[in-house]
Image (cartoon, grey):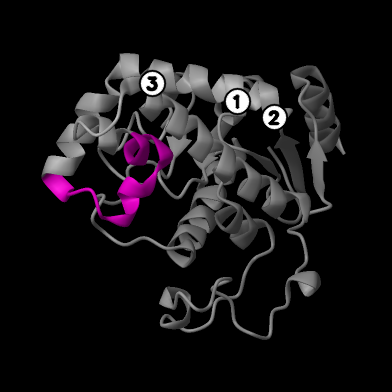
Amino acid sequence: MAYSLAPPLIVIVGTTASGKTSLAIELAKKFNGEIICADSRTVYKEMNIGTAKPTLSEREEVVHHLLDIVSPNQKFNVAQFQELVFLTIEDVAIRGKLPILVGGSGMYIDSVIFNYRFAGSNAYRDSTNPRHLSPDVPRQELMLRDNTLIFGIDWPKDILVERSENRVRAMIKSGLLQESIMLSERYGWDIPAMRSPAYRSFRGYISGLKTMDKAIADCVVYDGQLARKQRTWFRRNNSIQWVNDPNIIVDLTTTFLNT
């Protein structure tokens, strides 16, 4: 794959439970790509089911990068993520593959496509600095990375609720409760990594404080709350093309790569 400026980059964003991963896998198989995961939870080792991490079989189909980077009790921030992604994009492109950045963590995505310039190391650890940015970088002045095509996946609320509930039930069948117990015994419930909706929802069930149905319902509610935040974040980016039809995405990607 030849390129004159920045390597071509496909980006797929969207809310939780929207089907980003499956779409990215199909796109990667069609265009000789590799997936770079942009998720603030799947960076953690051992947290597989509750974070909806791509399965082993999915990772056998297509190479996935930036999974299982740190232990659940270790700190990891957007500046570290950005540095790793830049290196990964270069590595994937040099090997003649198409990098496909996929995820729902808005700040992680934006740090790459807008090339955030971070303030000193203390600034991006400061919780009072929500953008983790140098104050001289207002959002409206951020320039989109060259040679980048961005797709957004979203669904009406009722469909997203159904998808979320189906995913939670599939997680339970895959061993969510056992994984949650293992993680809580090893790291406790109160580390930031355990705030993912699935672990958070089933803590009460595991402790005998709520029913299974209530835990599932809570997880769907938490997913909905997260989806609203994600939607609000991504809708501010006018460069995103909101398309749910895989065929249209394939056509647009083909045109982009041949331009």
Question: At label 3, which amino acid type do we have?
Answer: Asp
Which region shows up in magenta?
Answer: 186-201
Amino acid at circle 1: Val
The three-letter amino acid code for the residue at tag 2 is: Lys
Q: Nearer the viewer, residue 218 or 1?
A: 218
Instruction: Between residue 117 and residue 172, name the one nearer to us.
Output: 172
Q: Position of residue 96 (x, y in %)?
A: 60, 37
- Foreground of the two, 210 or 219: 210
Residue 136 on image: x %, y %: 68, 85
Of labels 3 and 1, earlier in sequence is 1
Cα separation between marks 2 and 3: 20 Å
Q: Is residue 205 above or below residue 45?
A: above
Please report contact status of discs 2 and 1: CB closer than 8 Å, yes or no: yes
Q: Which residue is mark 3?
A: 213
**Height in image: 185 above or below 121?**
above
User: Which residue is at the far left?
Assistant: 185
Q: Which image quadrant is residue 149 in?
A: top right
Q: How far apart in space, not on screen, are marks 2 and 1 (Cα)?
A: 6 Å
Give the structural element (helix, strand or loop) at label 1.
Answer: helix
Question: Which quadrant would the N terminus be assigned to in this image?
Answer: top right
* Mark 3 vs 1: CB contact within 8 A: no
Residue at 48% of width from left, 67% of height from top?
Answer: 79
Quadrant of the snapshot with the C terminus: top right
Query: Is 53 on the left-hand or right-hand side of 98?
Result: left
Q: Which residue is mark 2?
A: 157
